[in-house]
Image (cartoon, rainbow, N blue to C red):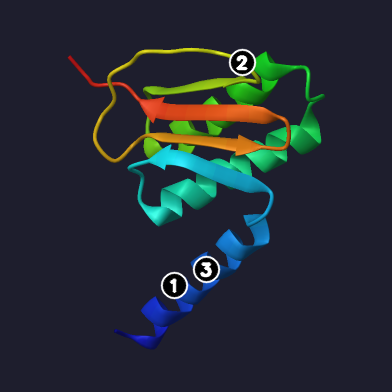
Amino acid sequence: MTSREESEIQNQEGKVKMLEGKAMVRETDMPMKMQIQAMSSASEALDLYDVSDCISIAGHIKKEFDKVYGSGWQCVVGSNFGCFFTHSPGTFIYFALETLNFLIYKGISS
C-alpha cells in the first residue's frame, strides 16, 4: 500500500469518526467512500433546510449523488415511511441521522 492510499484510508476513517454518534447505518451495500458521501450530504442538507422540509433535503442529496456518481439516484427522507424497490448492486444505504431516516439508492437501468 502506498503512503497516498494509507493517507486516503486515514482520511476516510476520520470522516467516519466525525459522523460517528450522529449517523447510524442500518443497512448498506455501498463502498465506504460512498457511505461517507451519503452521510455528509445528509448532514449538509440538514444545515441548509428545516428538518420538516424532507422534500428539499431529499432533493439536495439526490442532486449531489447525480452530480458525483451519475444520474439515476433516488432519495427518500422522513421519520416514518415504507418502501419496496430494486437497486443496482453497491448503491444502497439506509441510515438515521438526527430525527430522520435516509434511504439512498440507484435504480437498475432497463
Measure the alpha-carbon separation of dots 3 and 2.
Answer: 30 Å
Q: Residue, x 43% and y 55% (percent of image)?
A: 33
Where disc 3 sits, the SS reads helix
Percent of width and height locating residue 35 = 47, 47
User: Do the CB atoms of the residues marked 3 and 2 lie less than 8 Å apart?
Assistant: no
Q: Residue furthest right?
A: 50
Q: Is residue 49 above or below residue 24?
A: above
Residue holding disc 1: 9
Dot label at residue 13: 3
> Is residue 98 left or right of 5 when viewed as pictured?
right
- Which amino acid is tagged 1? Ile
Q: Residue furthest left?
A: 110
Q: Nearer the viewer, residue 37 or 78?
A: 78
User: Do the CB atoms of the residues marked 1 and 3 lie less than 8 Å apart?
Assistant: yes
Q: Residue, x 36% and y 45% (percent of image)?
A: 30
- Which amino acid is tagged 3? Glu
Q: Nearer the viewer, mark 1 or mark 2?
A: 2
Where disc 1 sits, the SS reads helix
Q: Rate crowding at label 2 as few (under 14), some (14 to 19) or many (20 or more) other CA atoms within 10 Å.
A: few
Percent of width and height locating residue 14 = 59, 69
Q: Is residue 71 above or below residue 90?
A: above
Q: Residue, x 37% and y 77% (percent of image)?
A: 5
